[in-house]
Image: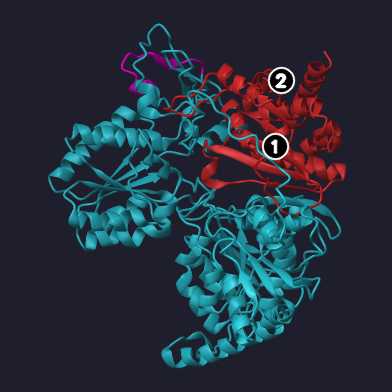
Chain colours: A red, B cyan
């Protein structure tokens, strides 16, 4: 029973998850593979949990089944942990090393979250995309692109469908002015960080 | 050039809503109208961005009723038009919707109803296909984002052919999914933008005598559609003649098809894709039912197709077992997850789904839920703090706050609790008035600027006319924020970017008889004083209203980035902070966090938009501006 390649993007509304989905979608078009990207807009975007479903390969049904993710890319640790219901034993998790607790609640420590993720027996990769985005662009706004660059280097499943050059093309198509160069530099740097991570 | 205007043969990545907009342009529309509402907004937004280039007229109307009337008026003069609204927006336009079917149109008129199964951003998940049955208007339901591109064009053709309105019903996962779409048509360079009004009073004046005639005319059209339109692309039948039949409508078809494919059972059943669920054309369904022993109808939300299939079986005297909502969930959004097992069971397989979740991650304390919250720097946060503090100072206790639809609805949460009801657009004022007649409490009706224009004016007049002591509180951030910052009558800008008269809520309130206090919520202390005074006057019997005016923080932050203006960034001076948590507990600002294990909060400086509310709350003056803001930063707000 072959299904499509299922990529879950998660994070907090406002972190650029929808933009990330769109860049991957354009990247897939450039790579010549079919894709669907299911987003949510409106109230759920105001600082709430956001999940974007990217399904690569032919097919129309846009939502990834619980347990059906091949890869999960998450821009925040709590959301990464939350979105693991989409994971099965073979899922790869790439998660931003950024813990952003919601207001007025108790929440687990970073190390507790990481231990719980490890306890599930998953392959996971941790990357400080906020820091790298800040270094290269002077703002955390591009942490989405940093995490994608890293993911493309460490996740050999995802990189079967899209390559760095496809995302570079998508950045050129989507962004304007000086943001194109900054984000391409950021993508390259985080990609190289990812390569070093898997082949130290 | 916008990718929406790409040429025939090109492949572009389009959101369902963009695909509908593109298809409407190809269909030759010249008028497009809407009031924004998730998940419909991007249809008209997309058209507004290319309106000038395409020579079409696009407007953000004051509400869905007026949007519908504007587009409908064009269509009865022979100008093709589209109006788009969220499912609950159709309720607002329901009066004219019903009449439009009686009188019909002269040229293609498509009403997009963007439904929201699962209530991602809505107060209910009503299934608007019922409106088709109620109003005798055909409903076309695409199965995917790209399907909506082709079917929108079909919807215009159907509408033109029968001179009848057509509802295009999408759902969130059609509206807000992006897919590559291969464009198979061009946008016509010539289109009809000037209409002719045919003075056919019998048709347009629905007095009872005329309405009876129009009803007869409408029912003939309805019957003709049922008889003639049971064809591709409205009804596709694969593998006719099997004893097991799966009928699926809209996006449910995509889930059903994938489930059957995963089960390697596509050839074991007759599969019907329904894109015209209302009225379901009987002929092709009858043919299939005659060979069938068992049928499974898969559709999201209500049994609209199922009921009609059962009617057809009864009418034809067929003894076939028809399943539907006895196997498929009636509540919430469908997915391959929720469809796989019923489909497997229906075809007699015990196959487990090909995915097995590792389950939820368990931690101590658990992963907390993350509902949406007011953004960092949101002026609504400051307004809520100011209003509650001023009520206290004036000695008013147990205030009841009625609420409305917008970002500010999030004020229902702690620590604000300044939204105690939320039902529908404009509801804050009408509900408050009713409360005012039966409760002893002070009642404050909280409503946003765009919502006030949409549905707040009649109920605010009713408060004065029928004399209740309600205090209207208009949260004016000079935009329709929740749906992505569309202009409205208070902004002085139209959908096409033209300047127009800005209508101020305080002028309307003053005219109606309210003493109206306008505050700037960035100036916390000054506003508290103004409102304390106003509440004291209210206690003496004065009729008061409040307008709190400040731009949306997201727009300010965006403009600051674009114009390279540095906004203040606040920081908590550790030595001065005693960890009283007033800033955390009174603002619930997402930029203020308490690091795990720490007893003192910190500000995530990259998230701070510099509203300064926390600094004015801190009893120990421990919160200060960290950076050097641009001298003109306050002008951005």
Is residue B500 toward the left or the right of residue B285 in the image?
left
Q: Which residue is mark 1?
A: A20
Tell me if residue A33 is in the magenta stretch. no
Who's the residue at 57% across and 87% down the image? B219
Answer with mark 2 or mark 1, whichever residue precedes in sequence. 1
- Can residue B132 be seen by looking at this rendering? yes
Q: Position of residue B433 (x, y in %)?
A: 25, 57
Subunit bearing disc 1: A
Is residue B170 toward the left or the right of residue B372 in the image?
right
Residue closest to the eye, B470 or A156 = A156
Q: Which mark is residue A136?
A: 2
For the view shown, which residue lies furthest in the left direction? B540
Residue closest to the eye, B167 or B560 = B167
Tell me if residue B625 is in the magenta stretch. yes
As drawn, B186 above or below A189: below
Q: Quadrant of residue B25?
A: bottom right
Subunit bearing disc 2: A
């Amino acid at each position: 029973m072959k299904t499509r390649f299922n990529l879950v993007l998660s994070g907090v509304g406002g972190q650029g998850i929808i933009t990330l989905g769109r860049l991957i979608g354009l990247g897939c078009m450039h790579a010549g593979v079919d894709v669907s990207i299911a987003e949510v807009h409106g109230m759920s975007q105001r600082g709430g949990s956001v999940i974007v479903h990217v399904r690569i390969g032919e097919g129309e049904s846009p939502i990834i089944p619980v347990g059906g993710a091949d890869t999960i890319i998450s821009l925040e640790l709590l959301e990464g942990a939350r979105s693991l219901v989409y994971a099965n034993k073979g899922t790869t998790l790439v998660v931003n090393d950024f813990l952003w607790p919601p207001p007025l609640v108790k929440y687990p420590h970073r190390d507790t979250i990481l231990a719980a993720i490890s306890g599930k027996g998953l392959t996971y990769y941790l990357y400080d995309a906020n820091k790298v985005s800040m270094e290269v662009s002077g703002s955390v706004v591009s942490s989405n692109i940093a995490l994608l660059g890293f993911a493309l280097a460490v996740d050999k499943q995802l990189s079967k469908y899209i390559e760095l050059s496809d995302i570079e093309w998508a950045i050129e198509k989507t962004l304007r002015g000086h943001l194109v160069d900054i984000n391409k530099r950021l993508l390259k740097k985080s990609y190289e960080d990812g390569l070093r991570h898997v082949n130290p | 050039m916008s990718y929406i205007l790409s040429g025939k043969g090109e492949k572009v990545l389009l959101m369902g809503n963009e695909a509908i907009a593109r298809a409407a342009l190809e269909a030759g529309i010249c008028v497009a109208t809407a009031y924004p509402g998730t998940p419909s907004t991007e249809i008209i937004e997309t058209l507004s961005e290319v309106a000038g280039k395409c020579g079409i007229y696009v407007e953000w109307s004051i509400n869905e009723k007026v949007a519908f009337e504007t587009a409908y008026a064009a269509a009865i003069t022979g100008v093709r038009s589209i109006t788009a609204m969220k499912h609950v927006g159709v309720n607002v336009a329901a009066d004219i919707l019903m009449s439009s079917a009686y009188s019909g149109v002269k040229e293609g008129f498509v009403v997009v109803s963007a439904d929201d199964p699962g209530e991602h951003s809505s107060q209910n998940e009503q299934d608007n296909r019922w409106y088709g049955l109620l109003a005798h208007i055909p409903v076309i339901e695409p199965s995917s984002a790209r399907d909506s591109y082709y079917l929108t064009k079909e919807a215009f053709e159907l509408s033109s052919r029968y001179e009848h309105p057509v509802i295009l019903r999408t759902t969130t996962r059609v509206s807000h999914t992006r897919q590559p779409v291969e464009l198979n048509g061009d946008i016509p360079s010539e289109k009809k933008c000037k209409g002719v009004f045919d003075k056919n009073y019998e048709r347009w004046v629905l007095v009872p005598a005329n309405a009876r005639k129009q009803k007869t005319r409408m029912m003939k059209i309805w019957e003709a559609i049922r008889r003639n339109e049971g064809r591709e692309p409205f009804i596709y039948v694969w593998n006719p003649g099997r004893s097991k039949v799966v009928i699926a409508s809209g996006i449910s078809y995509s889930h059903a098809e994938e489930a059957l494919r995963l089960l390697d059972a596509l050839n074991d059943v007759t599969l019907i894709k329904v894109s015209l669920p209302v009225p379901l054309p009987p002929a092709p369904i009858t043919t299939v039912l005659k060979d069938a022993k068992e049928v499974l109808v898969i559709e999201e939300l209500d049994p609209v197709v199922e009921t009609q299939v059962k009617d057809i079986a009864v009418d034809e005297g067929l003894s076939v077992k028809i399943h539907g909502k006895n196997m498929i969930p009636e509540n919430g959004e469908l997915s391959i997850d929720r469809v796989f097992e019923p489909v497997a069971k229906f075809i007699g397989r015990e196959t487990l789904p090909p995915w097995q979740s590792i389950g939820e991650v368990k931690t101590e304390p658990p992963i907390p839920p993350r509902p949406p919250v007011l953004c960092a720097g949101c002026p609504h946060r400051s307004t809520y703090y100011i209003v509650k503090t001023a009520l206290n100072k004036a000695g008013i206790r147990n205030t009841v706050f009625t609420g409305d639809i917008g970002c500010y609805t999030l004020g229902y949460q702690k620590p604000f609790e300044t939204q105690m009801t939320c039902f529908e657009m404009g509801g804050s004022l009408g509900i408050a008035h009713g409360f005012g007649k039966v409760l002893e409490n002070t009642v404050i009706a909280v409503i946003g600027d765009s919502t006030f224009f949409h549905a707040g004016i009649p109920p605010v007049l009713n408060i004065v006319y029928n004399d209740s002591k309600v205090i209207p509180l208009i949260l004016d951030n000079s935009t329709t924020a929740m749906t992505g910052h569309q202009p409205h009558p208070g902004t002085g800008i139209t959908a096409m970017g033209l300047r127009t008269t800005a209508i101020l809520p305080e002028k309307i309130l003053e005219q109606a008889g309210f003493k109206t206090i306008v505050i700037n919520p960035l100036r916390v202390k000054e506003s508290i004083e103004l409102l304390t005074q106003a509440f004291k006057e209210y206690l003496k019997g004065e009729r008061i209203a409040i307008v709190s005016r400040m731009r949306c923080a997201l727009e300010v932050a965006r403009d600051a980035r674009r114009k390279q203006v540095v906004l203040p960034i606040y920081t908590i001076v550790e030595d001065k902070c005693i960890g009283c948590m007033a800033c955390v507990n009174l603002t619930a600002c997402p930029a203020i966090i308490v690091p795990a294990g720490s007893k003192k909060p910190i500000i995530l400086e990259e998230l701070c938009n510099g509203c300064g509310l926390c600094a004015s709350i801190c009893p120990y003056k421990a919160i200060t501006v960290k950076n050097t803001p641009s001298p003109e930063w306050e002008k951005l707000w």
